[in-house]
Image (tube, rainbow, N blue to C red):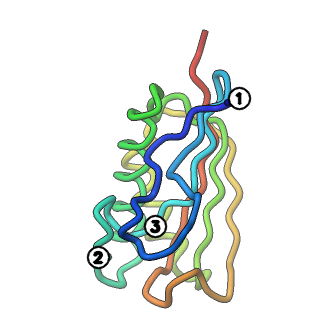
Amino acid sequence: MPHTIIRPYPESYGRDLSFCQAIRAGNQIFMQGQVSWDLDGKTIPNEPGAQADQAMRNIKTVLEDAGSKLEHIVKMTVYVTDWRYREAVYGAMAKWMKGIHYCSTGITVAGLARPEWIVEIDVHAVIPD
């Protein structure tokens, strides 16, 4: 197999999905977009900053499972369902990413996969040599 699967979805999700939280390919980590679900599948309330904070908590955990860490993030794509959430979302992200330089793209979308999700953060990271 040319890559390593990080945190595959359990069969208990009720679907035959071959998704996982991340893929490690060489020294690169490609992560599934993280949302306000904790890694046990519970969603937190519809508050942009709190949802971004949970997504960042998930990102940190999954990166560590893959042998990486927040400091190794090179690109983040942030999806929000309302542009007015941007300040709260980026404020929450800043607490986790202080002093870490990375590229970022912000996109406002009509909706995410579940109606209670208002922010999703997609990450690409590396593991330095």
**What separation in Å lies between label 1 and label 2 (alpha carbons)?**
35 Å
Amino acid at pointer 1 = Pro
**Residue 39 sits in which quadrant?**
bottom left
Q: Position of residue 72 (x, y in %)?
A: 54, 29
Task: Please tell me whether mark 3 sits on a helix, a strand or a loop.
Answer: loop
The three-letter code of the residue at mark 2 reads Ile
**In the image, is residue 128 above or below residue 11?**
above
Measured as percent of width and height from the top left, residue 60 is found at 39, 42
- Which picture quadrant has residue 25? top right
Could you tell me which secondary element the residue under label 2 belongs to?
A: loop
Residue 12: x, y in percent?
36, 69
Q: Quadrant of residue 50?
A: bottom left
**Residue assigned mark 2:** 44
Q: Amino acid at mark 3?
A: Val
The residue wearing badge 3 is: 35
Q: Which residue, given by chain and number where applicable, does mark 1 sit on?
A: 2
Which residue is at a point 65% across and 36% down the rendered structure image?
Answer: 74
Q: Position of residue 122 (x, y in %)?
A: 60, 55
Q: Earlier in the sequence, mark 3 or mark 1?
A: 1
Between marks 2 and 3, how big is the CA–CA gap? 10 Å
* Discs 1/2, front: 1
Who's the residue at 43% across and 87% down the image?
Answer: 116
